[in-house]
Amino acid sequence: MDITLRPITEEEYNEWIVISTNHQAKDQSSASGKTMSEEMEKLNKMLPLLLPNGPHTERHHFYVIDTLNQPNIGFLWIGKLPHLDDSSIFLFDIYVRSEYRSKGIGRTAMIQLEEIVNSLQYDKILLHVLKSNYARNLYESLGYVPIENHEYSLIMEKEV
C-alpha cells in the first residue's frame, strides 16, 4: 500500500496525544500489572518533561501516516533523549489505526522513517518495545537488534 509521512498539524497532534497516552497506558498496564490509571498518571507526568512545547519541542518530530485514499491512518513520533549521542534518535511512538493493521503500513512507514532520519543526519534509530508486543517481530524483520533486555521490554536499535 502506498503511504506518505507528513508533518503533523496542531489539531492532529491533539488527537494523537490522547490516542497515544491511552494506548501506552494500556500496554504498560498489561506488562507491569499496575492499573491503567496508575500508568496514565505516570505518562501525564512524563510527557510535559519530554515535550515542554508540545509539537514544537526542539529535536522532536511528529508525522501523520496517509494513504493515497485515506488521510490520517496513523502517527509517528521521533525525538532526542538527553542521554543519546548526537548520531541517535529515539522512536517514541508508531501507531496505526486498528482497521489498517496487518496491511504492511507499519513496515512501509518504518522504511520511510529511515529516509527521514537520514535526512535529519542521524545514524541510528532506537526504540522501546514490550516483549509481548506483536510489533517486535516487525522491528526484528527490519533489522533492529536488542541492545538492552529488561524484564518486560527491550531497547532495540538499527543503524540507518
Image: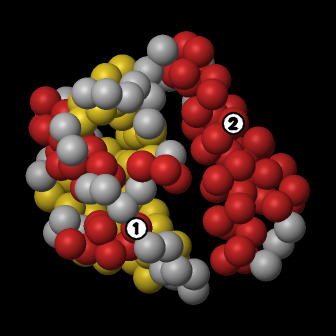
In the image, farthest residue toward the front: 69
First along the sequence among labels 1 and 2: 2
Q: Distance between the residues labelled 1 and 2?
A: 21 Å
> Looking at the picture, how far across and down is residue 12, in whole percent?
54, 22
Which residue does the numbered mark 1 point to in the structure image?
Answer: 135
| 130 left or right of 89 in image | right
Above-or-below relation of 75 to 71:
below
Question: In which quadrant is the N terminus drawn?
Answer: top left
Judge by depth and name the residue closer to the eye, 102 or 107.
Answer: 102
Judge by depth and name the residue closer to the eye, 91 or 64.
Answer: 64
* The label number, if any, that marks residue 65 in the structure image: none
Three-letter amino acid code at the position of disc 2: Val
| Residue appearing at x 44%, y 36% in the figure | 73
| Residue appearing at x 71%, y 74% in the figure | 30
Q: In which quarter of the image is residue 13?
A: top right
| 142 left or right of 61 in image | left
> Looking at the picture, how far across and down is residue 129, in whole percent?
46, 68
The answer to whether residue 32 is visible is yes
Which residue does the numbered mark 2 point to in the structure image?
Answer: 18
> Looking at the picture, how far across and down is residue 75, in whole percent?
44, 37
The answer to whether residue 52 is visible is no
> Looking at the picture, how far across and down is residue 28, in whole percent?
67, 66
Above-or-below relation of 91 to 16:
below
